[in-house]
Amino acid sequence: MPSIPLFERELSELAQAHLLRHRREVSPLLPPADLSPDQEHVRGTTYVINGQTRLSFGGNDYLGLSQHPALILAAQQAAGRYGVGATASPSVCGHSPSHEALELELAAMVGLPRAVSFVSGYMANVGVIPALVGRGDAIFSDALNHACLIDGARLSRADVHVMPHGDLAALDAALQASTARRKLVLTDAVFSMDGNIANVPALLALCERHDAWLMVDDAHGFGVLGAHGEGTLAHWGITGRDGVSPEWQGRLHRLIYMATLGKAAGVAGAFVAGESTLVEWLVQKARTYMFATAAPAMLTEAVRASLRVIQEEGGRRQHLARLRDQLRDRLRTGLKLPRPWRLMPSETAIQPLIIGRNEDALAVMAHLDRQGLWVPAIRPPTVPPGTARLRISLSAAHTCAHVDALCQALSEAV
Ligand SMILES: *Cc1c(COP(=O)(O)O)cnc(C)c1O
């Protein structure tokens, strides 16, 4: 049993390495209900952070839906209809008509036969992976995968092979060499700290060749990628509004699709979709589904409203793409960045600017903070040592003037 002085010593070591995380108290500048039309630009972009007003590039609210009036109304009405708590796990009495409808809508949206909802993405991953593989099986996990995929893999007790990021040849060889009974490949669909998109078609083809499963975590692609925000599968043409494309039909049973609902969808929760039997298996076996209280219907109804906005308001994705291009043009050609700073090649809303050393990243973050901008510095162990970065996260709620302000402040930090 570690003693308290031991924790104290380790905490001070973290502080010295500039690795302590400081939570901030954050609230929207104005209550969403109080906003007048001329204040729309503050909705989902401007926050009071530790008492100071800041323009935020820190959240994952890529479409600006966390404060959308339709979602807020749906939550309020659902609280009136259902109350505020689900009272039990889904298999006891926590599964409401709203949960049922949401799962049908999610499956239809991503073009897969069936979906099951979880209270969070973390819970989905740590529940699903151990339900699929166990001792004696093998997991092949991309080196940049999110922490909860890593934890799910550990919890499963399968042998974990950490694969070099995006290295299909290495994965091919590792799958070939494996004699495990079951093989599961794990990947972020959009890497959360780099913003790049995994080559899902190539991964699925490899899994087909080596009789493996592919689990894709689309926390950062769902809502953002695809013509209607269906996510990374639609981005690659694997699924569309009419379901799985014919070319991929025969390989569908290899695919486990997971996405979260607290980022672009603006609410909370997650879901896993795939073949009906697979989803039924998860309903029966995923312990974080079976033994956790279901999400309140307030949240599931807000998500249902969000799915409508995501699919109907395509202009949000177009605006987001314009902001991304504006930022990338300015930072790559308009500004001379000092070495080793570099903008990662990302086509998503996540635009990481690599700074290098932890203290340098913190210094740039502090400079931006003084200019009224909130951009988080991401340090190890979230990212590899020596690649501390500003994780610039764009939202459809931002205006071109917001992106200008960020570029201007960065040019002065140089
Ligand atoms: C945020 C995130 C999760 C966790 O989802 P929550 O709903 O926040 O628990 C899972 N995977 C990835 C890639 C993420 O970025």
Image (tube, rainbow, N blue to C red):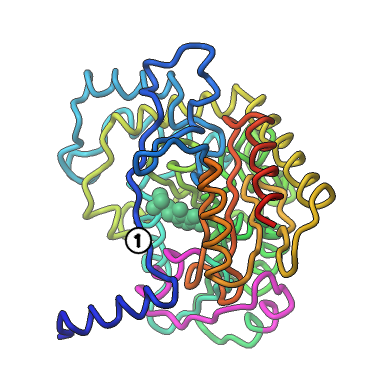
Magenta stretch? 146-173
| Residue found 53% across the figure and 34% down from its top | 108
Q: Quadrant location of ligand 1?
A: bottom left
Q: Which residue is mark 1?
A: 127
Q: Residue 90: horizontal and vertical position, in percent?
A: 24, 44
Q: Indicate the amino acid at tag 1.
A: Gly
| Residue found 21% across the figure and 46% down from its top | 293
- Drawn side of residue 192 relative to residue 329, left or right: left
Q: Could you tell me how many numbered marks the image carries?
A: 1
Is label 1 in a helix, a strand or a loop?
helix
**Camera-side residue of 395 and 288:** 395
Mark 1, ligand 1, within 8 Å: the answer is no
Q: Residue 7: horizontal and vertical position, in percent?
A: 23, 79
| Residue found 43% across the figure and 27% down from its top | 67
Is residue 259 positioned above or below 106 on the image?
Answer: below
- Drawn side of residue 57 relative to residue 14, left or right: right
Q: Is residue 131 visible?
A: yes
Residue 16 image-quadrant placement: bottom left
Crowding near the residue tagged with mark 1, few <14, some 14–19, many ≥20 C-alpha atoms within 10 Å:
many
Can residue 134 be found in the magenta stretch? no
Q: Is residue 279 visible?
A: no
**Camera-side residue of 365 and 212:** 365
